């Protein structure tokens, strides 16, 4: 047996060893800290010697902004490079002035709300900001609306899209109703239809949100059931998109009233609007004074409603001013004239034989033509003799080319070349180019052949693609 004294001695010795070990670990940790500090100092010196570190702060800040155009979250990456870049990134308000976020689940709310607060703080207090918030499920997004409302005086671009949320309109009205947005230039609202939601589906010019006014508003986009929110119709408005799929009780007088409130309108887009009664009085048929209107995009709604026809909507517009026209799902066109339309796009328009002659006469100035499934038009534009239809036509964009139209397309290009009115450019989307593969070599000997995106061009033409929001114009009814 071991004596008690020997056990006591060993316990003391072990404690001494453990204490020594702990002291050595503390020393090692301190050495590691000293190494990290020394490495950081060395890195700062090396970074300071780098060419980019010698750039003036203003120039480096401008470079950051250019990089952000290619990578939206660039400011986050930049802030992790070095202390100077972190300070510069956090101190450049414009890097935090473009807010984009999606809300899909309740668990996302705390982190997304913190992100919104951070962006609004760092972009303020005097810089304008843009906010794009997409709510993708039935969650309470009130706290986000409250934050936006607190900063609305400096909001220039606001896009709110809400899906599958029965109380979306009520929440939006609650937080936006009495606001004044003096700097708001672009407003895009989309609210999905939800079966259990309480809705006011009547459009009018008396506002239900932003009742304090939005005097700088130039672009307004309302889709889904958002038209019923009735944001203010500014006399400065130049671009307007209205989705009427769920709109009710729209009379010709209300329709005229809405457009008459936009005397500066340049670009107009109408999707699925239906007039609940025909124009009966002379005043209801009178052309509106929209002296700046140049671009029109209109999509008919294929229902049995007696006044759904796009022609009812067209009757009241100054069609002789239009330069760019997009018609979608329009199968019948009244005897209108479009003497100045140079850019014409026809999507899903199944015009009959009786319509073709009028179409040739109605658009004498077309320079660029986009066709989706249009057999009869390919045929009409290749007819020999006088007069030559659409003599100024130079560019043809081909979409969703049917196999049976391939030979007709080739004939069109050949005949117009023979008639001394050749096409300068023929463009195909991917599926059309594949179906036209058998004639591509021949076409390339006659004209320039190129590719186009599989998706319709952004609207309005010539706009800032970065700022363009999805307006659901092309969604299936």
Image (cartoon, rainbow, N blue to C red):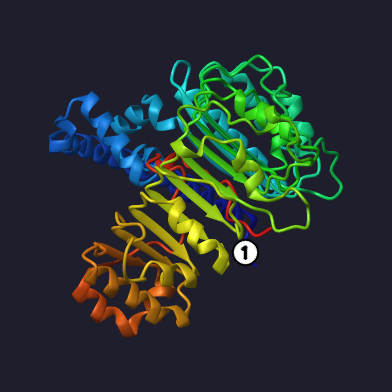
Image coordinates for residue 398, horizontal then vertical, percent: 40, 67
Residue extending farthest bottom: 438
Q: Is residue 436 above or below residue 143?
A: below
Residue at coordinates 76% horizontally, 41% vertically from top-left?
278
Task: Label 1, secondary structure: give it.
Answer: loop
Using the rendered view, name the quadrant where residue 248 is placed: top right
Using the rendered view, name the quadrant where residue 205 is placed: top right
Horizontal side, residue 151 vs residue 31: left or right: right
Residue receiving disc 1: 2
Residue extending farthest front: 386
Residue 286 visible (yes or no) = yes
| Residue toward you, 223 or 375 | 375
Residue at coordinates 66% horizontally, 44% vertically from top-left?
312
Q: Is residue 146 above or below residue 249?
A: above
- Numbered-mark total: 1
Image coordinates for residue 24, horizontal then vertical, percent: 39, 46
Horizontal side, residue 377 vs residue 287: left or right: left
Image coordinates for residue 107, horizontal then vertical, percent: 69, 47
Image coordinates for residue 331, horizontal then vertical, percent: 61, 60
Using the rendered view, name the quadrant where residue 81 is placed: top left
Q: Quadrant of the N terminus?
A: bottom right
Horizontal side, residue 98 vs residue 32: left or right: right
User: Around disc 1, counting alpha carbons within 10 Å, would you say few (fewer than 14), some (14 to 19), or many (20 or more)?
Assistant: few
């Amino acid at each position: 047996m071991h004596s008690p004294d020997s056990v006591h001695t060993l316990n003391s010795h072990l404690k001494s060893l453990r204490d020594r070990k702990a002291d050595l670990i503390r020393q090692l940790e301190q050495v590691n800290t000293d190494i990290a500090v020394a490495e950081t100092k060395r890195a700062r010196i090396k970074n300071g010697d780098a060419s980019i570190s010698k750039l003036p702060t203003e120039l480096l800040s401008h470079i950051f902004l250019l990089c952000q155009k290619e990578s939206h979250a660039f400011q986050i990456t930049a802030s992790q490079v070095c202390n100077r870049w972190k300070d510069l990134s956090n101190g450049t308000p414009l890097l935090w002035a473009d807010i984009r976020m999606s809300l899909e689940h309740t668990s996302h709310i705390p982190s997304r709300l913190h992100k919104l607060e951070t962006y609004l703080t760092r972009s303020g207090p005097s810089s304008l900001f843009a906010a794009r918030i997409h709510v993708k499920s039935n969650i309470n997004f009130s706290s986000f609306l409250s934050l936006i409302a607190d900063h609305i005086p400096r909001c220039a671009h606001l896009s709110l899209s809400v899906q599958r949320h029965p109380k979306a309109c009520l929440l939006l009205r609650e937080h936006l109703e009495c606001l004044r947005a003096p700097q708001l230039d672009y407003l895009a609202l989309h609210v999905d239809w939800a079966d259990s939601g309480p809705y006011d589906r009547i459009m009018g010019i008396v506002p239900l949100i932003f009742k304090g006014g939005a005097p700088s508003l130039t672009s307004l986009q309302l889709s889904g059931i958002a038209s019923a929110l009735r944001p203010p119709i500014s006399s400065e408005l130049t671009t307007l998109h209205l989705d009427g799929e769920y709109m009710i009780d729209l009379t010709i007088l209300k329709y005229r009233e809405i457009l008459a409130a936009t005397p500066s309108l340049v670009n107009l887009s109408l999707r699925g609007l239906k007039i609940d009664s025909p124009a009966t009085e002379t005043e209801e048929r009178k052309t509106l004074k929209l002296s700046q209107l140049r671009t029109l995009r209109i999509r008919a709604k294929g229902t049995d409603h007696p006044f759904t026809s796009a022609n009812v909507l067209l009757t009241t517009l100054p069609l002789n001013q239009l330069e760019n026209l997009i018609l979608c799902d329009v199968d019948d066109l009244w005897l209108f004239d479009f003497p100045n339309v140079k850019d014409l796009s026809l999507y899903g328009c199944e015009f009959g034989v009786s319509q073709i002659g009028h179409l040739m006469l109605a658009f004498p100035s077309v320079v660029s033509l986009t066709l989706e499934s249009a057999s009869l038009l390919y045929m009409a534009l290749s007819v020999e003799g006088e007069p030559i239809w659409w003599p100024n036509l130079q560019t043809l964009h081909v979409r969703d080319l049917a196999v049976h139209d391939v030979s007709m397309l080739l004939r069109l290009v050949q005949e117009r070349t023979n008639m001394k009115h050749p096409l300068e450019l023929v463009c195909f989307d991917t599926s059309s180019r594949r179906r036209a593969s058998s004639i591509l070599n021949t076409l390339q000997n006659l004209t320039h052949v190129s590719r186009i995106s599989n998706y319709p061009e952004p609207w309005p033409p010539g706009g800032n693609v970065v700022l363009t929001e999805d307006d659901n114009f092309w969604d299936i009814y």
